[in-house]
Amino acid sequence: MTVIEAEVVKAVRADVTPAFVRSVVTRAAKVPEVAARLPVDRGTVAIRITSDEEMAQLNRDYAGEDHATDVLSFAGSGGHVGDIAISWPATLRQSHEYGHDVETELALLSVHGLLHLLGWDHATAAERKEMNRLTRAALALSGLTPAPGRL
């Protein structure tokens, strides 16, 4: 079974522990479809919890879009699956908007980013449905359930 190691950097003050994010990603790697796309034996992912301003800069620099987003994924190579940037302010806003706790929203965004790194997308309704199914399955392994209407 593939092991995934997550390095978590908090670039802003965020009321969540890196250990929580690491545990969510480690459990998400146990979803069979996710495990099948991970590097053999060991993979790594880096997760940066940051500001809307930095997210907007990353989006400008790498996607050519001049706005902040909640999560961005940057593919890696070899055993490094890639990097995920998550906006802490967006995490707070969206947890309030959808009516679940901030940990659930952060976990959801972490899993979402990981799925993108492993090749899933949500451009079509069928892709969206599959990503949502995998996200729910991954969150369930951490005992988390997003609010109705979030996925």
Image (cartoon, grey):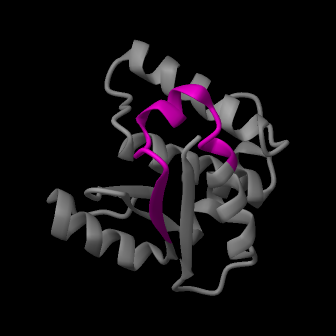
User: Which quarter of the rendering shows the N terminus?
Assistant: top right
Q: Is residue 62 covered in magenta?
A: no
Res 57 seen here: yes
Q: Tell me which residue sits at (62%, 53%) in the image.
A: 25
Closest to the observer, 90 or 33: 33
Q: Tell me which residue sits at (36%, 32%) in the image.
A: 121
User: Which quarter of the rendering shows the C terminus?
Assistant: top right
Residue 47: give x, y in percent of width and height: 49, 68
Can you say whether 49 is above or below 128 in the image?
below
Q: Is residue 29 covered in magenta?
A: yes
Residue 7: give x, y in percent of width and height: 54, 73
Residue 11: give x, y in percent of width and height: 51, 85
Residue 134: give x, y in percent of width and height: 58, 28
Closest to the observer, 54 or 80: 80
- Give the magenta range: 27-47
Q: Tell me which residue sits at (75%, 60%) in the image.
A: 102
Among the 4 quarters of the image, the one containing residue 83: bottom left
Q: Tell me which residue sits at (57%, 52%) in the image.
A: 3
Closest to the observer, 133 or 54: 133
